[in-house]
Amino acid sequence: MNFGELKDDLIALINRKDLTPARAGRFINRAVDRLERNVRLPFMERLVEYTITDSPDIDLPTDFLELANLYVDDVELEQVDMRRFLTWTKYGLTPKVFVKIRGQYKFRPEPAEGTVVSLHYYGAEDRMVTDADENMWAQAAEDAVLYGAAELAADFYEDERLSRFADKSAECAAELTAQGISDAFAGPMSVAPAAANEEY
């Protein structure tokens, strides 16, 4: 479903003459923003590889929402607070820990030039602007977008159907969350055996 179709459906659902297509579009994009803050689905996953050159730090992508994993040479790095980060030396063979400072990740030890850092993260979809635009939220979760936008519109207009739209919006979001969890654990899984000297 494209942006224009979503706006038409929202206008029909709210059924108010003063709900213009432009305002309907704002409610829809705000609903998508809220979903991206609260729901994690497979289509949001991204993988970017950085090859270290002049700077030992990496800049986060502009669509970055939340970290999934960060690793070097197939070894996952640990995110720590600044106090722990500063106890680590800058010098070493490969990074072990990192911190996020504004739009960057910084590492200790600092990665050598040529090191490949892999960033697995959840990213935002492109914002819908024209009526023909369509992103993955509009394709895979149109009911969640529509009822989220209807909730926002009902709140704006002090519509008596607010609680019904809010309940439906929450139900759609919960279904998406359950789907994301199910997808994450789909397929065969195994549990590593405990080491002989491992403490419990």
Image: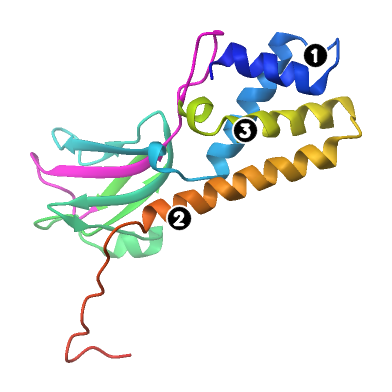
Using residue 171 as the reference point, say whether residue 112 is left or right of it: left
Q: Indicate which label's residue lies in the foreground, 2 or 3.
A: 3
Task: Give the position of the N terminus as an image quadrant.
Answer: top right
Please state which of residues 156 and 159 is positioned toward the viewer in this rendering. Answer: 159
Residue occupied by mark 2: 181
Rendered location of residue 194, percent (x, y): 22, 84
Per the image, the residue denoted by label 1 is 19
Assess whether residue 123 is covered by the magenta stretch.
yes
Give the residue displayed 69% in from the left and 10% down from the top.
22
Highlighted range, magenta: 108-135
The alpha-carbon separation of the residues under discs 3 and 1 comes to 19 Å
Label 3, secondary structure: give it: helix
Q: Are marks 3 and 1 in contact (CB under 8 Å)?
A: no
Mark 3 or mark 1: whose residue is earlier in sequence: 1
Quadrant position of residue 114:
top left
Disc on the earlier residue, 2 or 3? 3
Amino acid marked by disc 2: Ile
Q: Residue at x 20, y 60 (%)?
A: 89
User: Which residue position holds label 3?
Assistant: 143
Separation (CA) of disc 2 from disc 3: 19 Å
The local secondary structure at tag 2 comes to: helix
Labels 3, 1: front one:
3
